[in-house]
């Protein structure tokens, strides 16, 4: 991927925003268990950062996904994966299908305010019995005149307690499991919607995650994205951007994990010499740096193919798989080199160890990524 002066200018804008508008407040937000999404998103919207790849007609910048990749990577300078996850939901999980397949009225009503940051969005797919197995969702929408009546439950929903709407995958017919689903925008304040209490997670403490309950929620059929029954396909396409964002968003965190560990090991004196002077340590850190750059190259290559209009299901799945596993390896190794200090709560490496563990679970678990890759290789068992 070749970066132009415009790419570099955007990277500097995102880095500056991350370091001035997010980083100084992360301790406060972590203690509160939530961050002010509307406040942060409105500031991002004013800079055009929430609509980088979205249509100009609705306030976006209309740029290709290489610029979206810049946001995904450089927002990591905020050093808080909880906030990064919330931003990724807004830009790369809840709005890509709306941007591509929503009609003009729907985009004016929901996409435009998402780009300005006036609206906070959520992607509501997972359920208690259907996480990575998207086809198994049970939430049902039945027709009633010009409306849908929706009943069911969603689980692990990021931004749930602050969201203005949910981009929701539901069953709209009794057809086969891959043809009976639709994506529907559901405003959060409609009667019959209950957002449960925030889930107490081991990491991503300032990212509000909660269940959502739909009890006879009446939604106009015009809030459906695309044609009825195409929801599964649209969601699978939407996953491509989600997984590219997920891989890109880990890069700066891993870079910083190594940098902070090098500084610590250089200053830490054991047996009358710097810990960093041990060959086993500086060689191991060199190996990890090489792995990070390999992931960066894989992610950039997948982005190039995506821009070219290719199906990057395979490449995006590889990047997400590698990213989730590598961040675990990097954070675990660095934590070990920090010794007892690594096992304390208030340091960067232990925070990455906790926060980034979700990378191998959310958005499709490692095992699902392996299945997708295996299918593409032709090795997956046929039914």
Image (cartoon, rainbow, N blue to C red):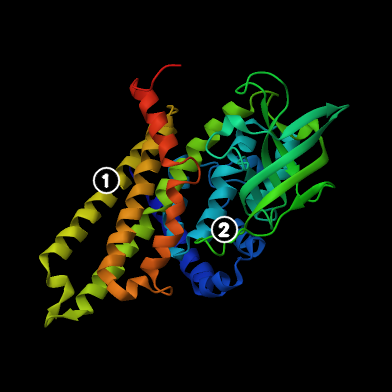
Could you tell me which quadrant the N terminus lies in? Answer: top left
Which residue position is annotated with label 1?
A: 294
Packing grade of label 1 (10 A; few <14, some 14-19, many >=20) is: some
Packing grade of label 2 (10 A; few <14, some 14-19, many >=20) is: some
In the image, residue 83 lies at what x, y percent?
53, 60
Q: Could you tell me which residue is drawn at 31 percent across and 75 percent down?
A: 340
Q: Could you tell me which residue is drawn at 33 percent across and 64 percent down?
A: 257
Horizontally, residue 360 falls left or right of residue 220, namely left
Which mark identifies residue 47?
2
Furthest-top residue in view? 383
In the image, residue 141 lies at what x, y percent?
76, 31
Whether 351 is drawn above or below 150: the answer is below
Horizontally, residue 311 falls left or right of residue 152, namely left
SS at circle 2: loop
In the image, residue 156 lies at what x, y percent?
60, 49
**Residue 312 in sight from this viewpoint:** no
Q: Which sits earlier in the primary sequence, circle 2 or circle 1?
A: 2
Horizontally, residue 276 falls left or right of residue 118, namely left
Examine the image and state in which quarter residue 316 appears. top left
In the depicted view, which residue is nearer to us: 380 or 234? 380
From the viewer's perspective, is the residue at label 2 or at label 1 nearer? 1
Which mark identifies residue 41?
none
In the depicted view, which residue is nearer to us: 205 or 299? 205
Q: Could you tell me which residue is drawn at 67 percent across and 50 percent down?
A: 211
In the image, residue 203 lies at what x, y percent?
49, 61
In the depicted view, which residue is nearer to us: 89 or 265? 265
Examine the image and state in which quarter residue 12 appears. bottom left
């Amino acid at each position: 991927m070749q970066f132009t002066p415009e790419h570099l200018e955007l990277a500097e804008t995102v880095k500056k925003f991350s370091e001035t508008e997010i980083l100084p407040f992360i301790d406060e937000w972590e203690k509160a268990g939530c961050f002010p999404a509307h406040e942060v998103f409105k500031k991002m919207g004013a800079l055009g950062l929430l609509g980088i790849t979205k249509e100009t007609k609705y306030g976006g910048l209309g740029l290709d996904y290489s610029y979206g990749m810049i946001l995904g990577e450089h927002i990591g300078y905020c050093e808080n994966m909880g906030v990064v996850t919330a931003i990724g939901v807004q830009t790369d999980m809840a709005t890509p299908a709306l941007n591509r397949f929503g009609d003009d009225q729907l985009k004016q009503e929901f996409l435009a305010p998402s780009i300005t940051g006036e609206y906070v969005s959520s992607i509501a797919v997972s359920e208690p019995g259907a996480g990575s197995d998207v086809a198994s969702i049970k939430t049902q929408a039945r027709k009633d005149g010009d409306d849908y009546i929706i009943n069911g439950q969603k689980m692990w929903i990021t931004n749930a307690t602050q969201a203005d709407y949910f981009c929701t995958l539901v069953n709209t017919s009794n057809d086969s499991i891959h043809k009976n689903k639709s994506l529907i925008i559901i405003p959060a304040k409609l009667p019959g919607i209950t957002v449960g209490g925030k889930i107490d997670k081991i990491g991503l403490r300032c990212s509000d995650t909660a269940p959502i309950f739909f009890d006879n929620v009446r939604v106009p059929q015009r809030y459906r994205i695309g044609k009825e029954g195409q929801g599964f396909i649209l969601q699978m396409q939407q996953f491509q951007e989600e997984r590219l964002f997920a891989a890109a968003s880990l890069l700066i965190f891993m870079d910083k994990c190594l940098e902070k560990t090098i500084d610590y090991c250089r200053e830490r004196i054991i047996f009358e010499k710097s810990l960093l002077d041990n060959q086993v340590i500086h060689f191991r850190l060199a190996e990890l740096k090489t792995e990070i750059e390999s992931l960066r190259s894989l992610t950039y290559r997948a982005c190039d193919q995506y821009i070219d209009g290719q199906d990057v299901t395979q490449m995006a799945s590889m990047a997400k798989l590698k990213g989730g596993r590598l961040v675990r390896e990097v954070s675990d190794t660095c934590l070990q080199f920090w010794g007892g200090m690594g096992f304390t709560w208030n340091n960067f490496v232990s925070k990455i160890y906790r926060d980034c563990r979700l990378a191998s679970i959310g958005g499709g678990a490692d095992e699902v990524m392996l299945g997708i890759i295996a299918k593409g290789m032709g090795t997956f068992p046929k039914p």
